[in-house]
Amino acid sequence: MEIFEKVKLGPLELKNRLFSAPVKTGYGQSVTERHIAYYSSIANGGVSLAYVEPIAVLPNGREHPKQLRLDCDDFIPSVAKIIETIHKGGALACVHLNHAGRAANPKVTNGVVLSSSETMCPVTGAKSTAMTKEEISEMINAFKENARRAKEAGADVLEIQMGHGYIVSQFYSKNINHRNDEYGEPLKFANDLLDAVKEVDLPVIIRVSGDEMYEGGLHAEDLKDLLKLAEKKDVIAVHVGMGNACNSPAFYYHHMFVPKQIQEDSIKKIRNLTTLPIIAVGRFGDPERIQKALSEGWADFFALGRPLVADPEFPKKLQAGKSDEITYCGGCVQGCLAKVKSGEGLGCIVNPKVGWPSKIEKSSKKKRVAIFGGGPSGLQAALTLNERGCEVKIFEKSDKLGGAANLAYKAFGKETMKKPIDSLINNVLRSNIDVEYNTDYESVKVDNFDEVLFAVGSSPIKLKIPGSENILQITGHDYFSNPDVLKDKNSILIVGGGMIGVEAADHLVNEGKSVTIVEMLSDIARDMEPITRTLTLKRLKNKNVKVLVDTKLEKFENDHAICLTKNGEKDIGVFDAIIFTVGVRPNSSPDGALKIGDADHPGQIYDAVHSGFEAGLKI
């Protein structure tokens, strides 16, 4: 099998084996300009089938307030505009229907949370009520009516979410369904639902979780009867992901910390349980991994979610033999999942044009622009200005582009973050943007430029602690730049429990060090993306990292660290080294300079890239 060959899926004629996955955008309940921009880029990027984002079939099945809707006829024109956009881009359109059940957001559903039985979702903390037969009938009919509206809107195929801890799986999961009526039979709900939806006369795909990855959850072998039912009902494919939205979200969102082999093993098990074609999803933004799956025969099609958020033209570039030009996703979920949950809408750390509704206009004058600093903000500003037709030159004080972002993938489990950083750098190096290394502001004649941008980053803060003169003191940046600096040190005190401090602790305990974190606030890792935070803190707890919150390092007496707590002074022991991770300060720039990224306001990679993008649009 080849990736780029014409192939049939049921009645569908497809131009290749690459699909876009149903990614939540959080752009609105009805169509917006951001929706059109996003789906246009996806369809024009070369996929054969583009999924419309998850649609909750009833208002009480929503996960977030800006979830796209199709629960009444008034929403048909909105979805039709999206499908029309997909078709114009050369792809077929699949509408993905779901009801979150116990995973619904109670803040969005006015406290109404339904499931097969009374249960609780660990992620939301909401307790669901067992559905009455009337509510079950209403929900099945809602799936049917949403399917009808999808067809009227021009959909080519439907996908029914039957996995990942959502409503259908809540009926066939023995861990959740404790009913003693006919809907206590695991497949009754799925059977009735498929019968209802099939009346609409559109091809149907089902989505399942190959393994829910928690104790008591569903595993591949538990899906055997559901898959046989799907075959019997003439479903055309099974879309296989991982995890459970309530119990194992890291696997559901295919976080960078999740080992790929676990996922591959679950898909292979599904392959042995069904004759249906398999659509594999989850971190398949790797051409070699796609080809491996095809060669070994455990997947037939591939749904790309975040890889297309990072680079919608992934398929086109791959088909043209330009995989080295793809901007790769690192699986951080900082710009996608986190921004949807915050209400800002789908974004990306290396693609600020996601859902960007405006055309990037050429500059009215071909300006010469100097950019000092080759970190993420400087790189993105240069790319944006270059796209607008400006002549751009980057002056980098070191001998390498990337700035502090080159440390992002040094932390434990974050190796995949090297790909997006390198992609950003390579995008600049492939362009006609001039780069001069080992150069600072003082040595450049800026009068030769029309505009000057300062993306000179920030520097970590190191505190002065009385009595600490005889102890090795470094910053978190120092440590990740050169971990060997602590090679002969065994007991480490980390002052500051933000992301860098927590990541340093995570890295150090894996080297066998004894680590203590001191944090002035009441908890740690507040600035980490929630899933990353949960997984990291769990590892720190399992590896006995000592965490002292509401605690301030005050002084050293006779080599002992003395801290100030709510209960007064406390001796926390002797340490071989101190790592300060108490924040950063913007590096100095000339008075009145136009500053971007950390030089203006320290933040994360997402903030830096978007700061550079916005500056590039304004000049």
Image (cartoon, rainbow, N blue to C red):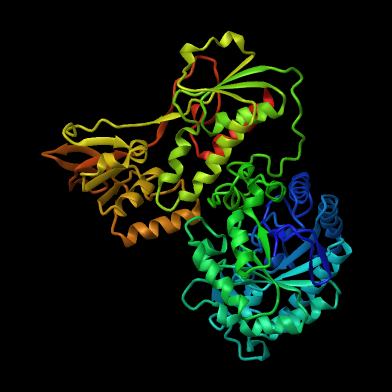
Percent x, y of residue 274: 66, 80
Q: Is residue 463 above or below residue 212?
A: above
- Residue shown at the point (66%, 76%) measured from the top left: 168
Q: How many marks?
A: 0
Compare residues 542 and 240 and report the one nearer the observer: 240
Q: Is residue 374 visible?
A: yes
- Residue shown at the point (54%, 49%) measured from the top left: 330
Percent x, y of residue 490: 21, 48
Lateral position of residue 370 relative to residue 214, left or right: right
Residue 541 falls in which quadrant of the image?
A: bottom left
Percent x, y of residue 579: 29, 40
Lateral position of residue 470 relative to residue 269, left or right: left
Lateral position of residue 350 relative to residue 7, left or right: left
- Residue shown at the point (45%, 23%) measured from the top left: 397
- Residue shown at the point (63%, 88%) measured from the top left: 184
Q: Is residue 50 visible?
A: no
Could you tell me which quadrant the N terminus lies in? bottom right
Residue 545 falls in which quadrant of the image?
A: bottom left
Compare residues 107 and 147 and report the one nearer the observer: 147
Taking the view exactly as shown, the residue that stands out farthest to the left is 558
Residue 164 falls in which quadrant of the image?
A: bottom right
Percent x, y of residue 108: 65, 60
Taking the view exactly as shown, the residue that stands out farthest to the right is 152
Q: Is residue 484 above or below residue 215?
A: above
